[in-house]
Image (cartoon, grey):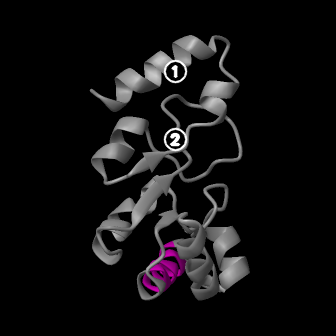
């Protein structure tokens, strides 16, 4: 499936991005789904990403250390689960924006901390500043 997607992507000049383990899943969830730890399953998926030469992978910022050690350097590392403040939501594997950048994230996905902020403009400014600190 990935190989076919990569072939089609070349024709239409787009990138193919894979997803490792959702940031809302914890080790218990991963164990139930894959009979392995989160890190073991993510490592397997990163190896598959290398084999298929996929353009990028979405992963928890907590797996960026694995990504840097396993993935080819040209593979984009896209990290959701960016939480600069304590929030009670479904994300269980999170990191601050600045930490994620320092750990090797190519791109950050910052959703609810901005979209649900009382002042979206201030939240955008905050994240922009925190990334560059």
Give the magenta part as a residue range. Answer: 39-49
Residue 70 picture location, percent across and down: 33, 77
Q: Which residue is mark 2?
A: 82
Q: Quadrant of residue 47?
A: bottom left
Front residue of 58/86: it is 58
26 displayed left or right of 69: right
Inspect the magenta stretch and tell me whether residue 44 lies in it: yes
Residue 114 picture location, percent across and down: 61, 26
17 displayed left or right of 49: right
Front residue of 5/17: it is 5
Q: Which residue is mark 1?
A: 124
Q: Compared with residue 109, is residue 11 higher up or lower down, i.e. above or below? A: below
Is the stretch drawn in magenta largely helix, strand or loop? helix
Q: Quadrant of residue 31?
A: bottom right
Circle 2 or circle 1, nearest the eye: 1
Q: Compared with residue 121, is residue 60 higher up or lower down, i.e. above or below? A: below
Front residue of 103/109: it is 109
Location of the C terminus by quadrant is: top left
Q: CA distance from mark 2 to mark 1?
A: 13 Å
Label 1 CA crowd tier, 10 Å (few <14, some 14–19, many 20+): some
The structure residue drawn at horizontal position 71% and vertical position 47%, both measured from the top left corner, is 90
Label 2 CA crowd tier, 10 Å (few <14, some 14–19, many 20+): many
The structure residue drawn at horizontal position 60% and vertical position 83%, both measured from the top left corner, is 2
Q: Secondary structure at mark 1?
A: helix
Inspect the magenta stretch and tell me whether residue 46 lies in it: yes
């Amino acid at each position: 499936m990935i190989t076919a997607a990569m072939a089609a992507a070349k024709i239409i000049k787009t990138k193919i991005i894979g997803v490792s383990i959702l940031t809302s899943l914890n080790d218990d969830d991963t164990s139930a789904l894959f009979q392995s730890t989160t890190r073991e399953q993510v490592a397997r998926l990163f190896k598959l990403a290398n084999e298929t030469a996929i353009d990028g992978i979405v992963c928890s910022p907590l797996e960026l250390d694995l990504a840097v050690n396993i993935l080819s350097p040209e593979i984009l590392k896209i990290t959701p689960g960016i939480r600069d403040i304590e929030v009670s939501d479904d994300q269980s594997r999170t990191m601050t924006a600045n930490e994620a950048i320092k750990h090797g994230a190519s791109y950050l996905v910052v959703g609810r901390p901005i979209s649900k902020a009382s002042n979206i403009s201030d939240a955008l400014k905050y994240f922009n500043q925190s990334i560059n600190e």
